[in-house]
Image (cartoon, helix red, strand yellow):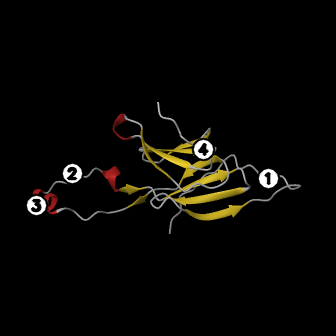
């Protein structure tokens, strides 16, 4: 069992390659856990903000082609499996302070913040977020 070290967990989301679990916590942090090799281990904490993370959604992963190593060129084999070339780039969270935030998974920093309307001064709780794939 792994403690979140961040209070109650309000939301969870598994990345598209099923290797990382994101936890949206009560203290305003997002914790990343590795699901690789059948074990659950802590990876890192993204920058903390002063609100609860009520919902999470991973952005579509990006394919990053690696140059082949000299060994694989000479042997003609590719030891890297296909999943190792997919890189998670961002995570989106719906928050309890009338906002939606986008985090860069590599740096752990907030990239963007979108605010929602407040009705009669009451904060809007963003209980669900979803990221759609896009084509350039």
Q: CA distance from mark 4 to mark 2?
A: 37 Å
- State which mark lies toward you, 1 or 4: 4
Q: Which residue is mark 3?
A: 74
Q: CA distance from mark 4 to mark 3?
A: 48 Å
Q: Residue 49 in the image: x percent, y percent? A: 62, 56
Do the CB atoms of the residues marked 2 and 1 lie less than 8 Å apart?
Answer: no
Query: With 118 as the anchor, is 2 left or right in this view?
Result: left
**Please, is residue 29 above or below residue 72 in the view?**
above
Sequence order check: which comes first, mark 2 or mark 1? 2
* Element under disc 4: strand
Q: Residue 44 in the image: x percent, y percent? A: 45, 50
Q: CA distance from mark 1 to mark 3?
A: 60 Å
Q: Which residue is mark 4?
A: 25
- State which mark lies toward you, 4 or 2: 4
Q: Residue furthest bottom?
A: 136
What is the crowding at mark 3: few (fewer than 14 residues within 10 Å), some, or many (at least 20)?
few
Q: Which residue is mark 1?
A: 123
- State which mark lies toward you, 4 or 3: 4
Residue at the location (10% across, 60% down)? 74
Q: Quadrant of residue 131?
A: bottom right
What is the crowding at mark 4: few (fewer than 14 residues within 10 Å), some, or many (at least 20)?
many
Q: Residue furthest right?
A: 120
Give the camera-side residue of 72 and 20.
20
Q: Residue 51 in the image: x percent, y percent? A: 67, 51
Q: Quadrant of residue 87?
A: bottom left
What is the crowding at mark 1: few (fewer than 14 residues within 10 Å), some, or many (at least 20)?
some
Do the CB atoms of the residues marked 1 and 4 lie less than 8 Å apart?
Answer: no
Residue at the location (48% across, 57% down)? 105
């Amino acid at each position: 069992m792994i403690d979140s070290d961040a209070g109650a967990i309000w939301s969870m989301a598994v990345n598209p390659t099923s290797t990382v679990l994101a936890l949206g916590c009560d203290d305003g942090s997002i914790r990343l856990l590795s699901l690789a090799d059948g074990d659950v281990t802590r990876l890192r904490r993204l920058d903390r903000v002063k609100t609860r993370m009520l919902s999470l959604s991973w952005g579509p992963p990006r394919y990053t082609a690696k140059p082949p190593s000299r060994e694989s060129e000479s042997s003609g084999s590719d030891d890297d499996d296909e999943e190792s070339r997919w890189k998670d780039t961002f995570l989106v969270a719906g928050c309890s302070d009338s906002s939606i935030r986008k985090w860069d998974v590599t740096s752990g920093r907030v990239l963007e913040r979108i605010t929602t309307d407040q009705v009669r001064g009451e904060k809007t709780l963003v209980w669900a977020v979803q990221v759609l794939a896009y084509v350039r």
